[in-house]
Image (tube, helix red, strand yellow):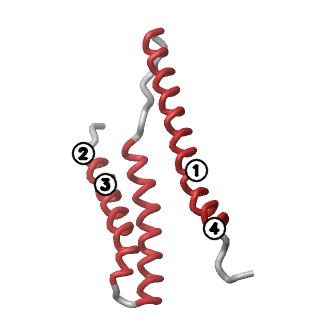
Amino acid sequence: MGTTPSVVAQVIIAIIPIVGIVMGCTVIFFYLLWHHQRTVLLIKSGQYQRPSFDLSSFCLLSGILLSSLGLSLTLVLILLEGFDFGLLGGIIPLAVGIGLLVFYGVSRDHRPS
């Protein structure tokens, strides 16, 4: 046997990701279609209730998670690579997390009692 894989194996390896992406898009499409149809039927029957979303809790949770992830990545990347462009992989989530925490703090101060 040679060191290069056969043509059939190369074709199968190339087709697998394409089929996976197409199937994933198909599942997402039908989920969105059926969810839309369900929402339309609920509105027509008068049973639709708008889902509630707590933005401040989401900002707090996301801010804490992104800040801790960004801080740990930043420290590890500084220790492994020093100050290089790879450090952006830790600084970006850290900055986004801090921004979300600042937004949570500002919105909490301006929220009516």
Separation (CA) of disc 3 from disc 4: 59 Å
Task: Report helix, strand or loop for mark 3.
Answer: helix
Name the residue that disc number 4 marks.
7
Q: Marks 4 and 1: CB-CB under 8 Å?
A: no
Q: Which secondary structure, mark 2?
A: loop
The kind of residue tagged 3 is Gly
Circle 2: residue type: His
Mark 4: which amino acid?
A: Val
Along the polypeptide, which appears first: circle 2 or circle 4? 4
Q: Is residue 97 above or below residue 29?
A: below
Dividing the picture into quarters, in which one does residue 61 lie?
bottom left
Q: Count neighbours of disc 1 (C-alpha within 10 A) and say few if under 14, some if 14 to 19, many if 20 or more.
A: few
Q: Tell me the mark number nearer the camera, choosing from 2 and 4.
A: 4
Query: Which residue position holds label 2?
Result: 110
Q: Earlier in the sequence, mark 3 or mark 4?
A: 4
Q: Tell me the residue that label 1 is attached to.
A: 19
Q: Residues within 10 Å of mark 3 (few under 14, many from 20)?
A: some
